[in-house]
Image (cartoon, rainbow, N blue to C red):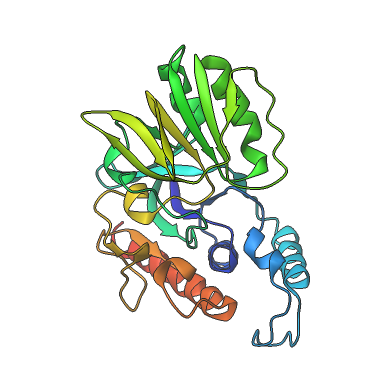
Amino acid sequence: MYDVAIIGSGPAGISAAINLKILNKNFIWLSSRAVSKKVGQAPLIKNYPGLPDVTGGELAWTFKNHIERMNIKLEEKVVTGVYDTGGKFTLLAGEEQYESKTVIICSGTETVKSLEGEESFVGRGVSYCATCDGFLYRDKTIAVLCTDKKFEHEVEFLAGLSKKAYVFPMYQGYDIKSEKAEILLKNPVKITGGQKIEKVHFKGGEVAVDGLFILKGVISPSTLVHGLEAEGGIIKVKRDLSTNIAGIFAAGDCTGAPYQYAKAVGEGNVAAHSAVEYLAQNK
C-alpha cells in the first residue's frame, strides 16, 4: 500500500511528486501522459518566477528534466475511479488496482465537456475503460467517444469485440482501422435511457446503443470520486487543500481560478505537505 497516490501530471502533480520524494514518502503517480499536454502547448509564459518569457515547451522540458534527475517514475494510466475502502483508497486504472492511504487529485480541468446524462449512466452503460468493461459488450452495439489519437488502439479493440461500433473522433487526423467501426463526425451532446443507456444523441440525429465508452485523459471529479464536493467541475477545498473526504486532497486547475502554472505548483506543494501531515496524525 502507498502512502500517497497522485492523479495528474500537470504542474500541480509534478510539484506534489517532487515534494513527496523529498519527504521520503512511498507514493504512486498516475496520469495519461508523462507531462501535461497543456503545458507544452503554451506559446509564452511571462509570470513564472525565475523563468521570464519561457515557452510552454521549454517549461515542459524543465519539468521533465527535474523529474528524471530525481528518479521519479510515473505510471502512464488513466484513473477511472477512486473508492473509499475503509481507512484506505482503491484506485482503478485500466485493469490495475492500487491502494493508498491518501490521494492528491491534480487532474486539471476537462478538455471535453461531459455529456448530459453522462454521470447518471456511469455503471449503467457508460464506461471509461476499454480493457475493463469491453468484454461486457461482446457482439453488442456500442458507441465510442475518442478524444485523442493515442486512444485509437482501444477503439479498435472495442470495435473488434462488438457487433457494431459508432465512433465519434473528437480530433482531426483520425486513423481507426476496423470494419465494424462506423465513423460519425458529430459531437455527442446527450445520453438517454431507462435502467441502462439506450441512445446517444447528437445534433440532427441519434444512435441506439447498448453501451458508450468515453476515452479521455481527464474524468470529472464527481464521477471519479463518489461523494466528492464539486461544482461545475471544480473541487471544493479548504486552505490546506483538503476536500470534504478525509484523506483526499486536490491541487491545480481542478480547484479553480486562477488557472496559472505558478498557482498550480504552489498548491501541489501544499497538498503534498498536507497529505504527509494527515498521515502523521492518522498512524
* Quadrant of the snapshot with the N terminus: top left
Q: Is residue 279 above or below residue 168?
A: below
Q: Outermost residue, left direction?
A: 195
Residue 39: image location, x then y, percent: 66, 67
**Quarter of the figure with residue 24:** bottom right
Q: Is residue 163 above or below residue 167?
A: above
Q: Outermost residue, top direction?
A: 139
Front-lying residue, 237 or 125: 125
Residue 247: image location, x then y, percent: 32, 58
Question: In the rendered view, does 242 fall on the left or right side of 40?
Answer: left
Question: In the rendered view, does 64 fall on the left or right side of 280?
Answer: right
* Quadrant of the snapshot with the C terminus: bottom left
| Residue shown at the point (26%, 58%) measured from the top left | 245
| Residue shown at the point (72%, 71%) measured from the top left | 56
Front-lying residue, 193 or 221: 193
Residue 221: image location, x then y, percent: 37, 55
Question: In the rendered view, does 182 fall on the left or right side of 256?
Answer: right
Q: Total of numbered circles in the picture? A: 0
| Residue shown at the point (50%, 70%) measured from the top left | 268
> Does the rendering let one see residue 64?
yes
Question: In the rendered view, does 211 fall on the left or right side of 11?
Answer: left
Q: Is residue 237 above or below residue 163?
A: below
Residue 220: image location, x then y, percent: 40, 53
| Residue shown at the point (32%, 71%) measured from the top left | 237
> Does the rendering let one see residue 272?
no
**Quarter of the figure with residue 188:** top left
**Quarter of the figure with residue 256:** bottom left
